[in-house]
Image (spheres, rainbow, N blue to C red):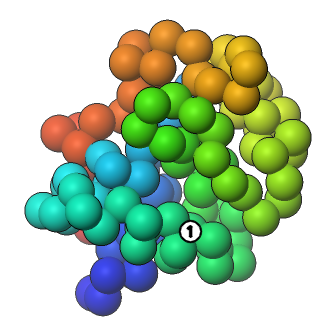
Amino acid sequence: MDFSELVLSLTKQIPKGKVTSYGELARFMGNSGLARAVGQVLKKNSEPIKIPCHRVVCSDGRIGGYNGGISEKIKLLRSEGIIIRDNRVQNFKRVLFRASEMRLP
């Protein structure tokens, strides 16, 4: 499994009502410095329904980018019970899906 496949597979594990960060995904893969590379993979996600990249945000809770636009990302997150204020996830640590909860596919 290559890097891109692993990122997409891990992203599928994020449950509704939770978010993770680009850094958490990179940390699970053993190198938190790969957070930007994780973002680049997700930017190319051609299956946003099957692979819920809208659940991946910045490590400080900021929403980050989304191919469908930030307003669509916020709408999707809110529909899953995530509270957003000023383009940030509220109670970020409480809704964070941590690297320690991820599993190898």
Task: Give the number of callouts.
Answer: 1
Q: Position of residue 39 (x, y in %)?
A: 50, 65
Residue type at the position of mark 1: Leu
Residue 66, compared with residue 59, is above or below; it is below
Tell me where residue 99 sits by quadrant. top left
Q: Residue at x 72, y 16 (%)?
A: 85
Q: Nearer the viewer, residue 18 or 41?
A: 41
Quarter of the image with the C terminus is: bottom left
| Residue at numbered disc 1 | 42
Residue 41 location in percent, x, y? 51, 76
Depicted 39 relative to depicted 45: above or below: above
| Label 1: how many Cα within 10 Å (few below 14, some 14–19, many 20+) | many
Where, by quadrant of the figure, is residue 29 drawn? Answer: bottom left
Residue 12 percent coordinates (x, y):
48, 57
- Residue at point 64%, 38% (across, down): 63
Does residue 86 appear in this view?
Answer: yes
Asked whether residue 18 appears in the rendered view, the answer is no
Q: Quadrant of the N terminus?
A: bottom left
| Circle 1 SS class | helix
Q: Residue at horizontal 57%, vertical 14%?
A: 90
Query: Is residue 96 shown left or right of residue 52?
Result: left
Q: In the rendered view, would you say 17 is above or below 26?
A: above
As drawn, the residue found furthest toward the bottom would be: 2
Q: Residue at 53% x, 47% y: name it.
A: 56
> Which of 80/88 is in front?
88
Choose between 54 and 71: the one closer to the eye.
71
